[in-house]
Image (cartoon, grey):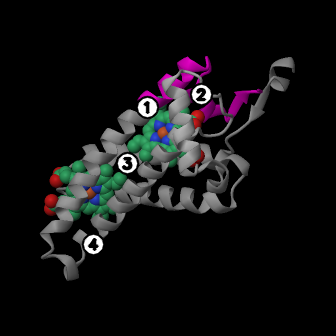
């Protein structure tokens, strides 16, 4: 009981389910070849659905899920990065400003991949070779961004002595 009182729910079930569905499907789509297309396409559209859901949830979800509550303005981001440089950045219960920017990038890349993947498969766009380059570039950028994202999670976990990975499963973090 005491342990439960010492924690607070920060991520609702929808945030956690969407996150792990998005991470699993987007990573698998990257490694599953596009020929034959079926499995790649199914994984890619599942990732796209998770990303579209997460973006919508960012407007109607619980407090910590809302973009309005975690997307930083430029001065707030700069102040946080400067504080990081001095190793004085505050612990945050929701996403920190640097993590928030990475989250927008990850979601944007998955949306780009879903849209470009769909366009590649439409007869109307078949001759647009540029789309294939965009799709491939976005896929590599997604994997690079995801690796940086995981490093950021590890860094912040060590810095504030808490397990952010576990929190993305349980939804719980210790109180301030
Ligand atoms: C392509 C792979 C991935 C994508 C697209 C992705 C995307 C995201 C997104 C969109 C969020 C925001 C969560 C929300 O508010 O809904 C997030 C947060 C998070 N992700 Fe990932 N993620 C990926 C891989 C991973 C992996 C492999 C891990 C394991 C270490 C991980 C751990 C976390 C954690 C711990 C958070 C919460 C960060 C915080 O406390 O602020 N992610 N991720
Ligand atoms: C997060 C989602 C996605 C990721 C990470 C991803 C990643 C990739 C990668 C790495 C390739 C090159 C691999 C290869 O040629 O075997 C590729 C190719 C391709 N993807 Fe995706 N993809 C995603 C979503 C989609 C979706 C939703 C579609 C829609 C049908 C799609 C359709 C294609 C097609 C048609 C190709 C072959 C392009 C070409 O001819 O060069 N992808 N994708």
- CA separation, marks 4 and 1? 30 Å
Can residue 40 be seen in the rendering of this structure?
no
Q: Tag on residue 89?
A: 2
Assign a secondary structure to mark 4: helix
CB-based contact (under 8 Å), mark 4 and mark 3: no
Q: Position of residue 126 (x, y in %)?
A: 16, 76
Quadrant of ligand 2 in image: bottom left
Instruction: Name the residue beneath numbered marker 3.
Output: 26
CB-based contact (under 8 Å), mark 1 and mark 2: no
- CA separation, marks 3 and 1? 15 Å
Residue at image coords 50%, 34%: 81
Q: Position of residue 174 (x, y in %)?
A: 73, 25
Residue at image coords 54%, 43%: 77
Magenta-drawn segment: 151-176
Assign a secondary structure to mark 2: loop
Q: Is mark 1 within 8 Å of ligand 1?
A: yes
- In the image, taking residue 29 as reference, residue 91 lies left or right, namely right
Query: Could you say which is closer to the camera, residue 102 or residue 23?
Result: 102
- CA separation, marks 4 and 3? 18 Å
CB-based contact (under 8 Å), mark 3 and mark 1: no
Instruction: Name the residue beneath numbered marker 4.
Output: 119
Q: Is mark 3 within 8 Å of ligand 2?
A: yes
């Amino acid at each position: 009981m005491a342990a439960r009182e010492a924690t607070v729910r920060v991520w609702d079930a929808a945030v956690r389910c969407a996150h792990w569905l998005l991470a699993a499907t987007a990573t698998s789509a990257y490694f599953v070849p596009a020929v034959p297309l079926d499995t790649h396409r199914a994984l890619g559209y599942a990732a796209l659905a998770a990303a579209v859901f997460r973006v919508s949830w960012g407007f109607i979800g619980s407090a910590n899920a809302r973009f309005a509550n975690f997307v930083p303005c430029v001065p707030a981001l700069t102040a946080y990065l400067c504080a990081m440089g001095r190793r004085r950045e505050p612990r945050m219960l929701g996403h920190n400003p640097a993590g928030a920017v990475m989250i927008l990038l990850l979601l944007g890349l998955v949306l780009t991949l879903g849209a470009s993947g769909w366009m590649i498969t439409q007869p109307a766009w078949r001759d647009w070779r540029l789309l294939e380059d965009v799709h491939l570039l976005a896929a590599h950028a997604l994997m690079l961004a995801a690796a940086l994202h995981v490093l950021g999670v590890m860094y912040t976990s060590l810095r504030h002595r808490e397990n952010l990975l576990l929190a993305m499963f349980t939804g719980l973090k210790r109180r301030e």
